[in-house]
Amino acid sequence: MSDPTLHHTPPNSDSVNTKEVDTSMVDIGHLLRDILSKMKSMDKLDNIAKDLDKLDNIAVEVRSVRDDVQTFRGELQGMRDKIYTLENAVEELKQIPNRKNQFEEAIDKTISDMLSTLEYHQKYIETVERQTNNKNIIITGVPEFGNILGSDDVERVMHVIKKTGFEETDEKLNIHMKRLGKIRDDLDDRPRPLLVEVESAEIQKEILMKARNLMYDDDCSNIFIKKDVHFTVRRELNRLKRREIDENENPMNVGFVFKFDWKDRVLRKNGTIIDRFNPSF
């Protein structure tokens, strides 16, 4: 019997070819895996490239955001500056009442000082005027022209005073006088009043006491002597008297009677008061 272990079978050519094919297939598989691996790597590279592009876009957006943030910071600082300015303005406004009070107090003090000064001067002026007025008389109705009572105002006044019954002689009666008001065209009809200053209050008082005697003298019955008053009072009385005359002479007032009441110091139109004494001291 032959030994089976010693039996040698020659290789079959078909078997060898199959092994080569298997080896080739394995190599092809490895190659395919390498290709696939490389393809996957290429995909990763593409993804990485895309990610890099995204990063670039993000970087651009970040820079834009940074620019916006910087802009916002500038605007915020501007708002802070405005808030600071407004806070200062509010503080200034809060101080206005105090400043207003201080200003009002200063004005009140100035006005008070001015009033005190004016009051002092007013009292002084009134004292001087009182002393002067105590020697003054007002004579109305003395003609400015003509020789009925004298050739000039001095002679006319002396004539009127003598007609009152005043007993002093010409040498003892020292007087100063002037016409009041502006010169008018109708002087004969409405002569201006005379302001006459005599030597003393006693002489003034005596002349005033005897002035009623003029109504009994034919030449002096329309002449009146009154005590002098403050110039503002005299001006107001003259205004009322002048209005009485003007209203009565106005052609539009036909049928109306205007009368100035010296006692009540009012002007009446057919008995109704239309104006009254209102001096401005």
Image (cartoon, rainbow, N blue to C red):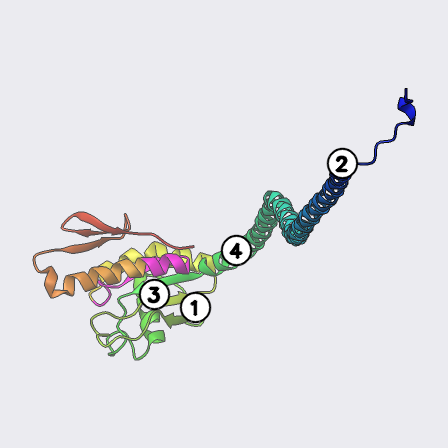
Badge 2, how many Cα within 10 Å: few under 14, some, many 20+?
Answer: few
Quick check: is 220 in the magenta stretch? yes
Q: Which residues are magenta?
A: 219-236
Does 114 sit left or right of 129 as displayed? Answer: right
Instruction: Indicate the position of residue 193 as horizontal and vertical percent values.
Output: 31, 67
Q: CA distance from mark 4 to mark 2?
A: 154 Å
Quick check: is 91 in the magenta stretch? no
Residue 250, relative to residue 273: is it above or below? below
Looking at the image, the residue that sits furthest to the top is 1
Mark found first going from the N terminus, 4 or 2 = 2
- Do the numbered discs 1 and 3 sit on residues whose CB atoms are within 8 Å? yes
Does 7 sit left or right of 266 as displayed? Answer: right
Question: Helix, strand or loop at disc 1?
Answer: loop
* Amino acid at pointer 1: Leu
Q: From the image, which quarter does the C terminus lie in?
A: bottom left
Judging by the rendered image, the residue that carries numbered circle 4 is 122
Judging by the rendered image, the residue that carries numbered circle 1 is 173
* Amino acid at pointer 3: Ile
Mark nearer the viewer, 1 or 2: 2
Badge 4, how many Cα within 10 Å: few under 14, some, many 20+?
Answer: some
Name the image quarter holding residue 220: bottom left
Q: Considering depth in this image, is 184 or 55 the residue closer to the camera?
A: 55
Judging by the rendered image, the residue that carries numbered circle 2 is 15
Judging by the rendered image, the residue that carries numbered circle 3 is 161
- Do the numbered discs 1 and 2 sit on residues whose CB atoms are within 8 Å? no
Mark found first going from the N terminus, 4 or 3 = 4
Q: Considering depth in this image, is 265 or 154 the residue closer to the camera?
A: 265
Badge 1, how many Cα within 10 Å: few under 14, some, many 20+?
Answer: some
